[in-house]
Image (cartoon, helix red, strand yellow):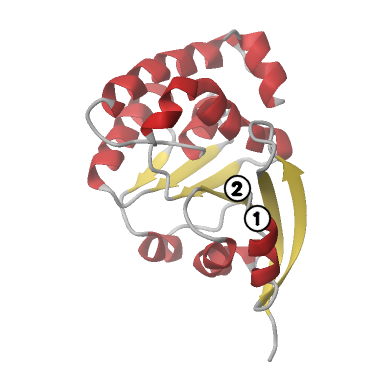
Amino acid sequence: MTPDTLSELSGVDVSRETFSRLDAFSEDFDAWANRINLVAPSTREEFWRRHVIDSLQLIAIRRDAKVWADIGSGGGFPGLIIAIALADDRDSRVTLVESNRKKCAFLQMAKAKYAPRTNVVPARIEEAIPKIDAPEIVTARALADLETLLSMTRSWLEKSTAGLFMKGREYVGEIEKSRTHWQFDLVTYESRTAADSAILEVSKLAPLRS
């Protein structure tokens, strides 16, 4: 992988400095993943495509956004990769919410080395969200079905926050189910890393009146 290739595949202009941070992070990630379960083992061999490019594509969708929050951050995808990519932008800040103690330790290590302005919140999502100012963008990957994500983040999405939720092949059914309880604006983007997956940009959330 090179900076130019990463830029082309992700749709984000990745500087050599950012690429160096991501490359160093990949080594730390591999070392920690040998000790704790950060991602599915089957995806580790495709680290750059399955995790880095997959995460960076969210910045390509919302290049204007400065304030991000990632819920259920786990091994750092997509939130930590976004934070590393935005580390040189002093106006940007990223909050990572994760309740697992071991994964939080990993996120804190990576924050200190690669994205020091990142805020790691070691708490359950329902406890953390009321304590965090509404971001411009909230992200989640492989966390829950869309209806659950909307319920989790409704206090933000009912304001000016937009959600970028990374979904697999069942996303159409999840959208249909969610619309039985919620109304919202939706833009669907084809994933750059998986032909049967999508990123759902959700905004202007409101419960349906019975």
Task: Say the numbered circle drawn on residue 205.
Answer: none
Q: Position of residue 68 (x, y in %)?
A: 56, 45
Residue at the disc numbered 1: 171
The residue located at (75%, 44%) in the rendering is 189
Decide: is 81 above or below 170. above
- At a point 47% along the width and 53% down the height, the residue shown is 143
Regarding residue 178, the answer to whether it shows in the image is yes
From the viewer's perspective, is 170 left or right of 111?
right
Residues tagged 1 and 2 counted as in contact (Cβ below 8 A)? yes
Does residue 113 sit above or below 41 in this rendering? above
Q: Nearer the viewer, residue 76 or 159?
A: 76
Within 10 angstroms of label 1, few (less than 14), some, or many (20 or more) residues? some
Q: Position of residue 206 (x, y in %)?
A: 68, 75
Disc 2 residue type?
Answer: Gly
Q: Residue at x 70, y 58 (%)?
A: 172
Is the residue 21 above or below the residue 97 in the image? Answer: above
Could you tell me how far apart the alpha carbons at marks 1 and 2 are, in whole angstroms? 6 Å
Which quadrant holds residue 150? bottom right
Front in this rendered view, residue 77 or 119? 77
Q: Residue at x 64, y 35 (%)?
A: 194
Residue 13 appears in the rendering: no
Q: Tell me the kind of residue under disc 1.
A: Tyr
Asked which secondary structure carries label 2, the reply is loop
Q: How many marks overall?
A: 2
| Secondary structure under the numbered disc 1 in the rendered image | helix
Closer-to-camera residue (123/100): 100
The residue under label 2 is 168
- Give the x, y percent position of residue 24: 41, 14
